[in-house]
Image (cartoon, grey):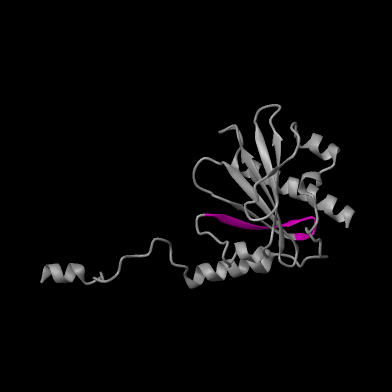
Amino acid sequence: MLATAALAGCSAGTDGTPYPIETAATAASQSAKAAQLPQRPAELTLQGVNLCEVFPQVQLDAMKITSAPREAPPEDGPTCVFDADGAEPVHAYHVRAVSADLDEWITGSRKKNSMTTEPKTVGGYPALTNYRAAGDPADCEALVGVARGQTLAVQTFAITRGRLTQPQLCEMSVHAADLALQSLKSSN
């Protein structure tokens, strides 16, 4: 009888859930994040934009980019890599044009329970920072909703480990996204 009482909370046919179940409170907090985002002031399309030319030379110098920008295999859209490898701490920026709305990272298919998303405003546009809060800080991504179905993603990677904090990586991503947004605004 004691064994039966101990097993009363378990179901014989359940294998368990490998991820946290989203509670109503979690869903409400995600909706609150979406509500904190400002409206997009204008549509800035990324179609036809050469991401390797999104930063003028003066901005590349300010960001300490020392190598020629290079196209990378598209992860989820066209991608350009900017390496800051002339001095420590070595880091890189990956700039991507993603065909998805910003809310996909909050409540949609791109939302990951292992990632922390924080609402931001970049150049008047709705934005998020997206990063893994646990472990050694390796990267941070700034996501800017530039147009319906289009997100500008700027991800900063720490190549030299242990020299950049998570807040620094996120600040660098947001700053680079803001610079890219200024270029997009001036070219549209």
Which residue: 56% across, 33% down?
A: 161
Which quarter of the rendering shows the C terminus?
bottom right
Which residue: 65% across, 30% down?
A: 89
Quarter of the image holding residue 61? top right
| Residue furthest left in the image | 1
| Residue furthest top in the image | 87
Image coords of residue 11 (percent x, y): 26, 71
Which residue: 67% across, 63% down?
A: 100
Labels in figure, total: 0
Tell me the chief SS of the magenta region.
Answer: strand
| Boundaries of the magenta span | 115-125
Q: Is residue 163 magenta?
A: no
Image coords of residue 74 (percent x, y): 65, 51
Image coords of residue 140 (percent x, y): 62, 47
96 relative position to 54: left or right: left
Image coords of residue 48 (percent x, y): 80, 56
Quarter of the image holding residue 60? top right
Q: Is residue 118 magenta?
A: yes
Quarter of the image holding residue 47? bottom right
Which quarter of the rendering shows the N terminus?
bottom left
- Of 155 and 73, the residue lying toward us: 73
| Residue furthest front in the image | 73
Seen in the picture, residue 111 relative to 75 is either above or below; the reply is below
